[in-house]
Amino acid sequence: MTSRDARGLVFDLDTFAVHDGPGIRMAVYLKGCPLACRWCHSPESQRSAQELILVRDRCVHCGACAAVCANGAHRVDADIHAILQDRCTACGTCVEHCPNGALAIKGYWVTAGELVERAARMRPFLDHSGGGITLTGGEVSQQAGFATAVLASRRALGIHTAIETCGACAWETLGIIVEHTDLVLYDLKLIDEAQHRQWTGASNRRILANARRLAGRNVQVRVPLIPGVTDTEANLSGILEFMRRSELTRLALLPYNASAGAKYEWFDRPYEIIGEPQTAEWLAAWAVRA
């Protein structure tokens, strides 16, 4: 099998992304993440597998899905439609039989070669805007072989490459990917380890260690601003001090986006974050400090 045949599991593809690196970009969203951030903007990215979602405001509880499901993954009555994910094989039969488009499979397989060919067709447009390709997620390092195959091929075409990563992986994995990357967008969420475990389900020790090893490369540290969690004085001051000590010089503060809440209904999960986006004045004040 050649590198072009390497397969990756993707849950979205945006050919007009403007927030994931310079210019207009083709953003490829990979499935699978080692963290479980309680504010995750893409809960459909977390599992390293295809999965069924339910758009509840389209469901009329007709029971057509339950009637065709061979695994009994749907429980439907007049008031409730529950998906038993442990029984679902993401075969798509129920999706085909839903009369209102209330069901969908999140995640599809694509080869590195297919993505490279699509990027090649877009190259004049990407070059004109100063853009390129960004691999994001989920977490890029969860599909390291596929990511490396895509990035190496696209660099050979002269297309700018970027990755967005949380850094929660072995350096041996991340280091290989970075060698094929023009820009690293590095997520730092919480500087305190106990808080990081509380809100993401994992330690940040490896994340911070990998960040230090990226000093001297083209890196932008990005902090998602979650009200009362990551946007506190203590957390942001701690991140700035860590960056100074680690010789990381570029910081982007990403204002809170509450639109993720609707996605949690797809999985019958609660969305517990309550708050408003940070004001322009607040962001300007922190920009001066950075």
Image: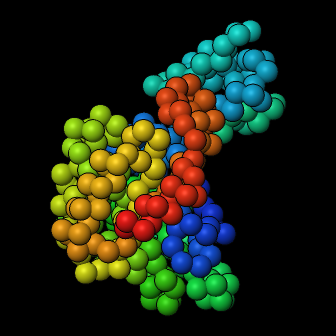
In front of the other: 197 or 50: 197
Residue at 32% x, 74% y is 249
Does residue 199 sit above or below 79 in this rendering? Answer: below
Q: Residue furthest top?
A: 78
Place of residue 132 in the rendered image (x, y in percent of width and height, measured from the top left)? 55, 79
Tell me if I can see residue 17 in this picture. yes
Does residue 265 sit above or below 45 in this rendering? Answer: above
Place of residue 253 in the rendered image (x, y in percent of width and height, measured from the top left)? 46, 60
The quadrant the C terminus occupies is bottom left
Place of residue 97 in the rendered image (x, y in percent of width and height, measured from the top left)? 75, 31
Q: Check the image and tell me how it is coloured.
A: rainbow
Residue at 30% x, 55% y is 237
Place of residue 285 in the rendered image (x, y in percent of width and height, measured from the top left)? 46, 61
In front of the other: 68 or 205: 205
Residue at 59% x, 79% y is 23
Q: Quadrant of residue 261?
A: top right
Does residue 57 sit above or below 181 in this rendering? Answer: above
Give the number of marks.
Answer: 0
Q: In the picture provided, is 247 more to the left or to the right than 280?
A: left
Tell me if I can see residue 48 in this picture. no
The quadrant the N terminus occupies is bottom left
Q: Quadrant of residue 148?
A: bottom left
Q: In the picture provided, is 267 more to the left or to the right than 213?
A: right
Does residue 131 sit above or below 82 in this rendering? Answer: below
Q: Residue furthest right?
A: 99
Residue at 51% x, 73% y is 21
